[in-house]
Amino acid sequence: MKQKGFTLVELLAVIAIIGVIAAVILVNLTSARSKSRDARRLADIYQFQKALELYYDDNKQYPPSTGATAPNSSWSNSNDSSWATLQTELVPYLSLLPIDPSQSSSGWAGAGQFSYAYFSTGYGCNRQWFMIVILLERASGPDPGVKACDGTVFQYGGAGANTAIKTFGHAQ
């Protein structure tokens, strides 16, 4: 009489197939999560820019950037206390300043750390322009950059066709 069942080779083949399928699903899930965080970053910056423009309309200048530990004290950075100072300025326009979904404990986006950095001082027209620097997880398109009032162009992501660091801003 023949016994019914699976051989060891058949079981190993099934386990290998399940492993491959699980690996493919895990890679796709990780990719979807990073895309989702990048989409949130871009939405955060869009809202932040709108709040800055509303502030400018009322005050004829952008809020000061000051007190960051990185890159220097002329900036405001979402991973230190300078962000709370900026938050106080923007409360009427944005109830809570956004922070990066993968916020680094120190450093800034221009040096490859996850945070939002804001600058509005100097370069020919103090507080008449601003820039925001962020880091995306996936390089996507060129860095749009921003031109300060004196003509200096800032592109912390460089001039390449596909960059992860993005520089946004506006000059009056």
Image (cartoon, rainbow, N blue to C red):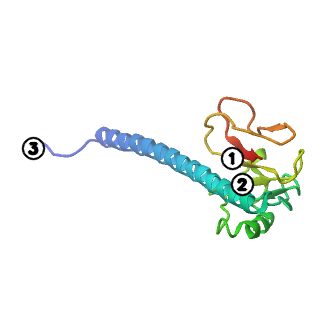
Q: Earlier in the sequence, mark 2 or mark 3?
A: 3
From the image, tell me which residue sits under label 3. Answer: 1
Q: Residue at x 79, y 68 (%)?
A: 85
Q: Residues within 10 Å of mark 2 (few under 14, many from 20)?
A: many
Q: Amino acid at mark 1?
A: Leu
From the image, tell me which residue sits under label 1. Answer: 135
Q: Amino acid at mark 2?
A: Ser
Q: CA distance from mark 1 to mark 3?
A: 68 Å
Secondary structure under badge 2? loop
Report the disc number at residue 115.
2
Q: Is residue 118 left or right of residue 42?
A: right
Contact, CB < 8 Å: mark 2 with mark 1? yes
The image shows residue 161 at horizontal and vertical percentages of 66, 29
| Viewer-side residue, 126 vs 111 | 126
Q: Residue at x 56, y 48 (%)?
A: 34
Residue sitting at the far left: 1
